Amino acid sequence: MGFATFMSSSLGRGLRGVAGLALIALGLATGSIVLVIVGVVPLAASVSDVCLFAPLFGASLKSADVRAKGK
């Protein structure tokens, strides 16, 4: 559950956003539409404040719920 807690934190949210932007930039640089689409997923999750990995660890999809539970 520690991983889900970290990824739901502000730092984890920022990391997801940066990773999404990096994948999109790499996809645009190489002409790979697949990388662009894959990059949109973590970027959209970051912007909408959800953690797609959290349900795999038994936590809520909403990052705010995970942060509230950790307090």
Image (cartoon, helix red, strand yellow):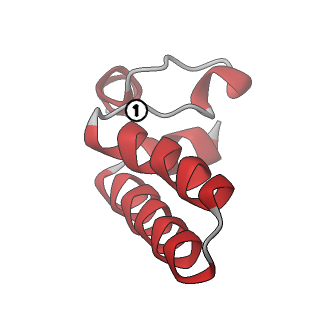
Q: Residues within 10 Å of mark 1 (few under 14, many from 20)?
A: few
Give the number of callouts.
1
Q: Residue at x 49, y 16 (%)?
A: 60
Position of 39 relative to 25 (above/below): above
Q: Residue pushed farthest front?
A: 31
Q: Residue at x 40, y 68 (%)?
A: 18
Residue 11 falls in image quadrant: bottom left
Residue 9 appears left or right of 32? left
- The x and y percentages for residue 52 are 56, 31
Residue 31 falls in image quadrant: bottom right
Disc 1: which residue: 70
Q: Determine whether the residue tagged by mark 1 lies in a helix, strand or loop.
A: helix
* Mark 1 residue type: Gly
- The x and y percentages for residue 37 are 56, 48
Residue 39 appears left or right of 8? right
User: Which residue occupies the foreground of this view, 66 or 17?
Assistant: 17
- The x and y percentages for residue 65 are 34, 20
Q: Residue pushed farthest bottom?
A: 29
User: Which residue occupies the foreground of this view, 48 or 26?
Assistant: 26
Q: Residue at x 27, y 42 (%)?
A: 47
